[in-house]
Image (cartoon, grey):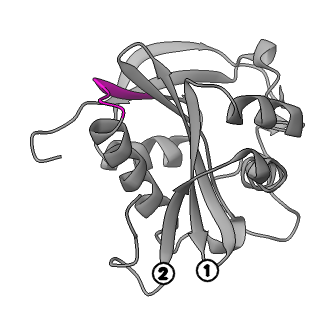
Amino acid sequence: MHDGSSTTSSPLRFRLATAGDAAVLHELVNVAYRGVAGVPGWTHEAGLVAGPRTNQAELEALLIREDTLFIAAIDGVRLVACIRLERDGTDVHLGMFAVQPDLQGRGIGKRLLAEVERYAWQVMHARRIVMTVISQRSELMAFYERRGYRRLGDVSDYPVHWDVGTPKRAGLTIESLAKWPVAAE
C-alpha cells in the first residue's frame, strides 16, 4: 500500500483491513452512511434511508471472502475511512466507501479513492471499476463524475432486498457508475 501523506498535512497510511477490523468497520460504515445527530457530514443518507447500512456479521463474512477486500485509511493508529472492493470477473466493484463524519472535507476520501483505484488497476488488474449510488444523491454523483466516473444509464428501484436500509420516501432509485483506466495509471 502507498503512503498517502504527500497531499495534505495528515499522515495517512493505507492497508488491507483484517477480520480484526470488523467491529471498527461496522461502526464506521454505519455512522458514515446514516449520520450522527449533531455531526455534519455531506455523504450520509440519513434523509433518504433508515436503518443500518451493514451489520458486524456481514462484515466478518466479507472480510474472509477471497473475492472481496477492504482498503482502510489509517490516521496515526485510528482507522478513519474504508472502501470495499469486490472482484466480479474483470470488473472491480467498489462499495461501503466511508469516511468518519468529523473528518470529512479534509481530502481523506479523495486520497483513499485514488489509492483504491491504483490498487484495482495495478494489483487486481481491473478492466473497469464499477459502483452503485443512490440516484437522488446529486452531490455524490458529481463527486464521482469529477473523478472520471461515468453513469452507465442503468437505473433501478432502491434494493430493499439487499438489506442495506429502508427508503424513507417513495421512488428512491440507484444507478451504476464506472471508470476505465487511463494510460498514465
Give whichever of discs 2 and 1 has the lower sequence position.
2
Q: Is residue 134 visible from the viewing direction of this image?
A: no
Residue 79 pos. (x, y %): 67, 65
Q: Residue at x 9, y 40 (%)?
A: 183
Disc 2 vs disc 1: Cβ atoms closer than 8 Å?
yes
Question: Which quadrant would residue 78 be assigned to in this image?
Answer: bottom right
> With 154 as the anchor, is 119 left or right in this view?
left
Q: Position of residue 177 (x, y in %)?
A: 41, 28
Q: Which mark is residue 174?
A: none
- Answer left or right for 48 relative to 91: right
All told, the count of numbered labels is: 2
Give the CA distance from mark 2 to mark 1.
7 Å
Position of residue 86 measured from the top left corner of the image (x, y, whole percent): 53, 27
Q: Is residue 39 magenta?
A: no
Identify residue type, mark 1. Gly
Q: Label 2: how many residues lie within 10 Å, few (<14), some (14-19) or many (20+)?
A: some
Q: Is residue 164 above or below residue 47?
A: above
Tag 2: amino acid: Pro
Circle 2 residue: 11
The residue lying toward the viewer, choosing from 171 and 111, is 111
- Highlighted range, magenta: 124-130
Residue 146 percent across, percent down from the top left: 32, 49
The answer, for residue 111, to whether it is visible in the render is yes
Q: Which mark is residue 76?
A: 1
The residue most toward the bottom is 9
Look at 15% across and 39% down and name the residue there.
182
